[in-house]
Each structure stands twice: as structure tokens, then as C-alpha cells.
Amino acid sequence: MTTSNSGPLAGVRVLDFGRYIAGPFCATLLGDMGADVIRVERRDGSEDRYVQPIVPGAAPGEGGEGSMFLQMNRNKKCITLDPMHPRGREVVAKLVASTDVVVANLPPATLTRMGLDLASLRQHRDDIILTTVSGFGRGGPDSEKTGFDGVFQAMCGAAYLSGNGEEPVKSYAAWVDFGTASFAALGTMAALMDRGKTGQGQMVEGALLGTALTYFNFHLIEQKLRGTNRVASGNRSQYAGPADSVRTKDGWIFVQVIGDPLFKRWARLMGEDHWLTDPRFADDLARGDNGRLLSERTAQWAADRTTQQALADLAAARIPAGRVMKPQEVLEDDHIAAVGYLEDVAFPGMPADAPVAGFPVRMSHSTVGIRTRPPLLGEHTDEVLGGLGYSAAQIADLRTEGVI
């Protein structure tokens, strides 16, 4: 972890009302780039603090926090607050007055009820930036519905085209949530740049359904313009080939060939030079249509080799390939360790340091990444409220009244 803060967003304050992934990780990315992020939670802790708990049944700060929380909340302070309480609204007003960005992944009507809509926030700071994330987006008949990542993997067509066609399969990775968080952070950065030029704040709106459609878009374009009506084909690509997972003597690898130069190198490695003039493999589309043959040939080749041997031969031929790794193998991978993609972050009550993926983009001048561990529940409530001018006695009264 780095202890200094020379990130490009140093001096920017963010209020994070987000929950689960899309909202909180947007704020996390802003924090990785130097923003001062304050996470606002319920007095007993927000539900996303306990997803996939490390020590099931344990209390906050004793290992009860979940793996999701440990990833989503580095570089943040935490206060507890009931924003619906009249005195809680007073605290929100003071916080917003000294804040640049409010992040909240809530449906539009809920934002309004909580006083976190743009019009309400502007009563406290007229150039505020509100970054919102909802499931379905504003303006349609489903706008007030809620939904999680898997719902939108299903709704965009991705789940239907995953698996082997026996049933739809969603990805284990929450790519819709993380993609939405990334787009929202990008939009927030742009809004900060615009405010620097115009002096105007604005609302930045992300939606999980919009992200899912964006990531899956070129498949939808093909469907509209060609009417292909594709069905699931396992790990085998339908657009090029060979691109598939194949078994070696001691494991699995994934090989991905796209474009004529790569196909020529693959054919020569396989000893199938005559396939270079075979009309079944004339271009990517033809190779995708006949991908089963290419996958079978690759599998035959790989079956005689260990994973290490197969990957070495593919690398020598400059053909993209990688080992299919179990999660424990990922943690033990030499390259991942050498590059430093995962950082050990200690947290109270945990049996060991957590391997947290830091900011995935390196910058040559600015310092970005993990500076502080995730916060304990309400760890910074007194500090933050004290900075707003509340005395120790006033803070004690707020706690007695159930505001914090």
C-alpha cells in the first residue's frame, strides 16, 4: 500500500451512499485516484458489509465482514447515519455543503425520498455532482424495479449464449456491476472536468441494463443485421477459431486464435499447413462456422502434452493461450505476484491479510492505488462530524437519538 496521496483526485470529497458493487466500486475507483471518500452506512451496518463473510456469525471488526466489502471499501472513511431522521437530514446537508460528489446506486424515486436527488442536493451546494446507478435506467416502464448483476446478464442475451445450450449460464464474475461502476467513475471524472471549466455540477447516471447491453452490443448488431439466431456453444467461439478450452495431460488451457496471421501460425504448429488453403477455414467467419473441427485438432495436440509444455509451445509460436486456473492457483501464480496485481491488506479480526486487487491502471506521474484498509463500521463518525463543527456533546446526543 502507498501512504502518500498525490493522486489526480486529491482534494475531491465523495459521499458514498452506495451498496453492493456498482455504487461502492465507483467510489472506490475515485478513492484509488486520490479522492477523500466517506462511506455512509446504517447504524447496524449496511447489508453489503456482510456478503460472503470471512468468519460466518462474527461481529463487525471480528471477521464478520465479507470478501465483497474488503474489495469495495479500501481508501474510505465510514460514518453511520440515518438520513431519513430529521436530524440525520441536517447532517447530510452539512456533509453535502463540503462535498464535490455524491454517489448513490438507488432507484430514482428512492433518491428523492432520501433527499439525495439532484434538486435536493443543490439546496446545499449548487455545483454538486450526483452520480447515480440504477438497475434499469430512468424513463422506462421498469425504471423503479430493482435488480442485480445476474438479472442483466440474462436480459442482455449473454446468459443465453453462455454454457452448452442445455440451460442459460451467467458468469461467476459480476461483470455488469463492475462495468457499471467503471463507466460511472469515468462519467464522474468527466463531470469534474466540466465543472472545472463551466462551474456547473450535474447528474451522472449509470444503469446495469445499459452496461450489459453495451458489453454485449456487437452480438446484438449481428443479430439485427444478419439474423444469425446463434445458440450457445460452450467455450468454443462462433466468430473465429480455434478458440476454445482444451484438456492437457494434467489440466486445461484456453487457446484463442483470431485473424489470418494467428491461424497460419496455429496451422503450422499443428502440422496442418494444408488447412491454409481449405475453404472451410478461409477466414474468421468460416473458421467459426467450422470451429468444432479446429477445437478437436487442438485438443488432440494438447492431450499429448502437459499444461506447461503446451503453453510453452504456444508461446513460442506467439499464439495467445493461458492456463485455466482454480482460484487457489490464481493466488499462487508467479506472474500475478511479480506484477503486484493483488496487494495484501490487513483488516481487524481476519485470519490473514486479504489479497485485494488494487487500481488496475498504472500512471507514470500520479500515485494511484490502495492507501488505507477498509473502515470499521462507524470508525470515522466522530472525526467526520467533528470536522463539520459538531461538539463531542452534540455527537453524543446524535448517538443517543439514534441518528448515528
Image (cartoon, rainbow, N blue to C red):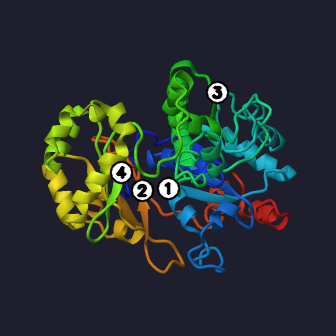
Label 3 crowd bin: few (<14), some (14–19), many (20+), radius 10 Å:
some
In which quadrant of the rendered view does residue 131 lie?
top right
Q: Which of marks 2 and 4 is in front?
A: 4
Q: Where is residue 344 in the image (x, y as percent from the top left)?
A: 39, 67
Helix or strand or loop: what does disc 2 sit on?
loop
Circle 1: residue type? Asn
Say if 370 sits above or below 90 in the image: below
Residue carrying label 3: 202
The answer to which of 128 and 307 lies nearer the viewer is 307
The residue under the point 20% across, 45% down is: 266
Helix or strand or loop: what does disc 4 sit on?
strand
Residue carrying label 2: 370
Q: Can residue 356 be seen in this view?
A: yes
Circle 2: residue type? Ile
Q: Which of marks 4 and 3 is in front?
A: 4
**Which numbered disc, 1 or 4, marks the residue that appears first in the sequence?**
1
Say if 398 sits above or below 5 in the image: below
Q: How far apart are marks 3 and 1 (CA)?
A: 25 Å
Q: Nearer the viewer, mark 1 or mark 4?
A: 4
Residue carrying label 1: 75
Kindly indicate whether the residue at mark 1 contacts the one at mark 3 (C-beta within 8 angstroms): no
Left or right, 248 with respect to 289, comes to: left
The residue under the point 52% across, 43% down is: 179
Residue carrying label 4: 244
